[in-house]
Image: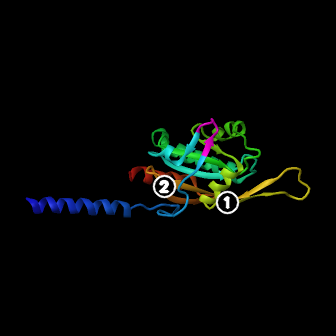
Amino acid sequence: MKALLWLALAAGILLGCGRQAELQFTGTDITGAAFGRQFTLTDHNGQPRTLADFKGKAVAIFFGYTHCPDVCPTTLTDLKAAMQLLGPELAGKVQVLFVTVDPERDTPEVLRQYVPYFHPSFLGLYGTPEQIAATAREFKVHYAKHTEAGASDYLVDHTAATYVFDPIGRIRLFWPYGHPAKDMAQDLRQLLAAQ
């Protein structure tokens, strides 16, 4: 009887290992990366936020700014489409965070109008220039002001990618700019099912 019990336990362990091996992400698997471990910012509703606040949900973090002419609205639109593909129940287990790299112009009021326009559950995060710089360093995100000749305003060059965390809070995926919404939804389904 003990031998059967040990055999069943070993089979369960092997099946558990096999389940992890079956994950076939469309994004780049960066599980175990030694960055993107934490941030301390404020959401557009004035609530202080850290990564730990979203434990139990898959989290997608994108760095951008509201005056961005193309990359940021396109990425947020793709994330919205992924949420729609997931359906209401699974989408409720995902949190999208938009971290501004332009704290000078992206005030809480601006973020409050801009970010939920794409999806009501999306949160805009801001902080002091020092907090934004520290968070960008932690996530290996580059950003810099850029002025075009003859322009009256500036653009912000920035890393155009999304990081994804599993519901336990571990960084798992890197989605490059232009990653299709259907692939985002597929990856998120796998992360949520694996828990």
Residue in the image at 12% along x and 60% along y = 4
Say whether residue 168 is left or right of residue 154: left
Q: Distance between the residues labelled 2 and 1?
A: 21 Å
Residue 146 lies in quadrant: bottom right
Location of residue 116 in the rendering, given as x and y in whole percent from the top left corner: 63, 38
Whether 46 is drawn above or below 77: the answer is above
What is the span of residues highlighted in magenta in the rendered image? 41-47
Mark 2, Cα crowd under 10 Å, few <14 / some 14-19 / many 20+, is many
Circle 1 SS class: loop
For the residue pair 190 and 10, the one nearer the viewer reads as 10
Q: In which quarter of the image is residue 14?
A: bottom left
Are there few (<14), some (14-19), or many (20+) residues within 10 Å of tag 1?
some
Q: Name the residue under label 1.
A: 159
Q: Residue tagged by mark 2?
A: 187
Q: Which residue lies furthest to the left in this view?
A: 1
**Residue drawn at 48 percent across, 51 percent down:** 188
Horizontal relation, residue 148 to residue 178: left or right:
right
Describe the element under mark 2 as helix, strand or loop: helix
Residue 156 placement, left or right of 53: right
Q: Nearer the viewer, residue 23 or 61?
A: 61
- The mark closer to the camera, 2 or 1, is 1
